Image (tube, grey):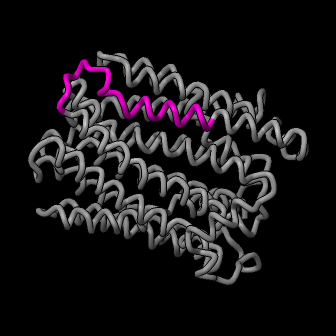
Amino acid sequence: MKHNRQAGLSFILLTVFLDMLGIGLVIPVLPTLVGTLTTGRDQQSYWYGALLASYGTMQFLGAPLLGALSDRFGRRPVLLAAIFGLGLNFLLTAISPWLWLLLVSRLIGGATGASFSVASAYIADITSPEKRSKSFGTLGAVFGLGFVCGPMLGGLLGSYNLRLPYFAAASLSLLNWLYGFFLLPESHPRSLRRPFSIAKANPFSALAALTRLHGIGGLLVVYALTMLAQSIIQSTWVLYTNFRFGWGPRENGISLFVVGVASALAQGWLLGRLLKRFGELRIALFGLGSSVMAYILYGAVLEGWMMYAIVLANLLGFTAGPALQGIVSKAVDPDKQGITMGSLNAISSITGVIGPLTGAPLLALVGHLSPRDWRVGVTFFLCALLQAIALAQALRCFRKSSTEQPEIAERAVR
């Protein structure tokens, strides 16, 4: 049993790494690829935002569905199907000469890229509740490592051919599928499987069920605002640095490499140590506060090198997400981890729709301005406002929990 758990954990970590490596490979080149099929910065921004929003829409619809399917049929078959679909998305993009086919591939990729919820449920299956936040942190660290290697490699490959990173990502997905097909054990026993219900698997009812969890509903607002701010930044980073600093695929690959290093360092090394000393509640608050300051600075700086300094100074900002996720997970029964992680991923996914649809039009409005105009940083200033609201809501929720539900607050502080 221990051997099977270790094999499953190794595969999940490798799956997340390869998935993020594949996604990271294409991040530095997608805006430029869109630019070759459009005319002008405004069209480039709008189409890029539409492609990202379509991906997020399908993730929103697919995340709780995949989570519910994994609760009913097991994690293994759902993970394998999702990995195969993600590879198909990369391959279609690599060979597409039309924007509409890029859109189709993004829809496929979004639906199958929601496998992170199943991976999170797999982790919850094989770890004890007291170790779950740390395990989610390890998962987040591997997630970050994919960004360490992916954008750097994608930027280098994209400097030779814009479509080469997509062929590389498709190959990685296929290799990952083969590895899982032969070596991945099942983590969800038949005795804990639940009947599948399409009503419960749709994202809106899944979110509604999550809000009814005792003591958790208010934290979902915090989580949603945090994910929305991150989504806006992720969807506009490459375009923003191109407009502000004139960065291309190579420079953006390097910058995202630094972001990945910082994320892996914070979630894989720093988080575990901080949790022992401060607990999940305080770490969430520290992380939210750190991010508010970082987002303001991102939008205000006028030299590219300053972006690197801010990333490294904001290590605490990378720890808020896993801490919030751990608090929510502890409030849920073992047989509902799949649908719960799917619901959290649905929140991330819907912010993945709202983020590009908000950030890209804002950048389109300021794209004609001088790179030194402070208004070019408007997307980051918006993110700082969202994160400040999340921090205020978190403080309110944790104060309420400490008085009305001391047992939940005590577990979070530990």
Q: Residue at x 29, y 60 (%)?
A: 171
Q: Nearer the viewer, residue 216 or 246?
A: 216
Residue 130 in view (yes/no): yes
Q: Is residue 84 left or right of residue 370?
A: right
Q: Quadrant of residue 127?
A: bottom right
Residue 174 in view (yes/no): no
Magenta span of residues: 368-390
Report the number of numbered marks. Answer: 0
Magenta highlight on residue 43? no
Residue 209 position within the rendered picture, expressed as x and y whole percent measured from the top left: 69, 67
Q: Quadrant of residue 342?
A: bottom right
Q: Is residue 297 left or right of residue 221?
A: left
Question: Could you tell me what secondary structure mostly forms the magenta stretch?
Answer: helix
Quarter of the picture holding the C terminus: top right
Compared to 331, does 300 lie above or below?
A: above
Q: Residue at x 62, y 71 (%)?
A: 205
Q: Residue at x 29, y 57 (%)?
A: 51
Residue 328 position within the rendered picture, expressed as x and y whole percent measured from the top left: 72, 52
Magenta highlight on residue 375? yes
Residue 331 position within the rendered picture, expressed as x and y whole percent measured from the top left: 79, 55
